[in-house]
Image (spheres, rainbow, N blue to C red):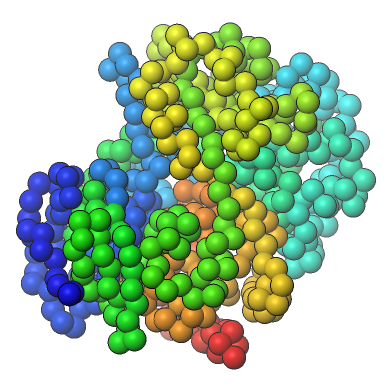
Amino acid sequence: KTSHSQFPSVIIKWADHSCSLLAMEDPKQSRKRVLVVGAGASGLACAWSLGRQKNKFDVHVWEKDSHVGGVCTSEGIGQDQWINDGVQGAAPSYRNTFLFHQEFGFEHEPVHMRVAFGKDKTAWNNVAATQIIREHEREIERFGRVLRHIMRFKFIYAFIPIRIVLMLHWFSKSFRDHLIFPLTALFFGTGNQTPHVSSVVVASVFLDPDVRLFDYDPASLLSQQPDFFAFKKLSEVYSAIANEMNANICCNRGVISVKREHNHKVVVLDSSGVEELFDELVFSCSAEAALKVLAAPRMIERFVLGNVRYFNDVTVTHEDEQYMRKHYEFSNKRGDMYFIRSDPSNSEVLEMSFNLSNYQAQLRGGPRNIYQTIFLNDQIRDCWTKEEISKEKVSTYVYSVREMVEANVTHMAPFSARGALGALLAKSTDIIFEGYFYVRLKNNFAMRLSHICLFKNTWYCGAYTLFNTHELAIISGLAVADRLGAPYPFKHDRLALKQFENLMNLKLDYHGWSRTATHFLERKILV
C-alpha cells in the first residue's frame, strides 16, 4: 500500500526520524514530487536549486544519518576546540562551492598552501629546491614540454593515464614515483589509484588558466605558495543550508527499497516501513548504496554502478609530532600543511598527512599542533604505520569514530568501460577521462542513467560521477536540478558557468540553454 507522508508537517529538526517542512504551501498536483536520497553536498545543492522553484517542485530529502553534510563533518578534539574532518578546504577555482555557501552568508578563510613531499633524499617542497629536484632538473624541464603537448592534443591524451604517458616518454621511475604521482595525489585525492588519472587532467592543473593551482616551474616543478581557502565549520555551514532551503528534510530516514512503476512513478520504502510515492528520484548517495536499494536495476545501472569500486581508508587525528618527524620531511617553522610520502618498500604506495593547525583558521596560532594521517586502502594495510602513532597522542573521540567507520569511508578506484557496452558509450562521449568513473555521457555530467534505461525519473549525482572533489559534488547536484527544470543559478559568474558547462557538456546559446546535442545523443544511445 502506498501512502503520502505520515510524518507531521512541522516538528523539531534533526530529531530521530524527523522532518522539517520549510515550504509551507499545500502541495499542488501540478508540482513534481522529488525525493533526493542523501543530504551530502551534492544532495543539498540539488534540493536547494529545486527548492528555489517552489511552484514547480515539492522537494524531499531523506538522510540515513542524524546529520546533514555527508563527509563534511566537524568534530570536537577536546579543550573546547574543533576541526573540520574529512573535507578541509578548496582552491579559488571552486567557484560553485563558494557561491553556494555565499548564498547562506558563509565566506571562507584564505591561506597560502605549503606542501612537503617525501623524506630525506626524496624530500622536496614548494618553498625551496632540494636534492631530488636538482637531480631531476632535466626531466622537470622536459615534462613541461610534454604537458604542453598533452594540452595541444587533448582528445588523444584524455584516454591515456598519466602513468602510461610518463613511461612512453621514458621518464625515470624516481621522477614518476617521488615527484609526479605524489603531486597528482595531492591535487585530486586519488591516493594509490593516482597512476590511472588522465594525463589531460594532470596537464590542466598547470596549464588551464581557469583551473590551474600552480604555474609550472621548468626549473623546480613547484615554486609557488598558491592561494587556497580553509572552510569554516562545515557542520554549521550545511546545517544552516538545510534549515534555510525550501525542502522537507528528514534525517535518520534511510531507504530500504525503490520500485519504479510503469506509470513513471517511484515507490520508495523507508527504514520504518513507510512507503511514499514520488515523480522523480535523485540518488545522491554512493553508487553501491543506490544499487543495493534498486528493486529492478537495469543492465546499464548494474554495470556502471557495480564498477565503481571503493577502498577503505582510515584517518587518525593525533598530536604525535615524533611520528611526523620520523615519517615526513617535517618543519613547523616553514608552516607546511600537507605531507605526502612514498612507502620505502614500494614507492608507488602513498601515505598522506595534514597539519590542521597550519591550515584551519580556528587552530592557527594556538598551543596545539593537530595532525591527521590518512592510511589508504586497507587491502595493503601491511604497509601502514598506524600502530606507530602513540595512543596517548591520539584524539580519543575522533580516533574511535575513524575506526568505527573504517569499512565505509572510502576513496574511489579507477573505472574504465569495457567490452561492447564500453565501445558503445565511448562513441557517444565528448571526452572520456581514462581513470575515474569514465562513463560520463555527453548529455549530462550528473549521468542520467534513466536515458539509457528508458526510465524517465531516476537521476544520479555525487562526487563519484567523475572526481572525488567537493566542487564536482556540488556541480553534479546543480546539474540534476537543471535537467529537472530548475535553471542553473550561477550564470552570472564566468568561471562557475564555464565549469558547469564543461562538465554538463551543454551549450549556452543566445536565447538560453540549447539541448539539441543532448537529444541527438539520447537517440543514438537508445538506438
Residue closest to the eye, 3 or 209? 3
**Image quadrant occupied by the C terminus:** bottom right
- The reply, left or right, for residue 426 in relation to residue 451 is right
- In which image quadrant can residue 155 be found? bottom right
Could you tell me which quadrant the N terminus lies in? bottom left
Kindly identify the residue that appears in the image at 21 percent across and 69 percent down.
276
Establish if 445 lies above or below 138: below
Q: Is residue 503 visible?
A: no
Determine the residue positioned at 68% across, 27% down.
383
Percent x, y of residue 332: 57, 13
**48 to the left or right of 324:** left
Residue 273: image x %, image y %? 21, 61
Image position of 507 with respect to 81: above or below: below
Is 199 above or below relative to 420? above
Q: Position of residue 233 (x, y in %)?
A: 33, 34
x and y, in percent, of residue 9 in the image: 8, 60
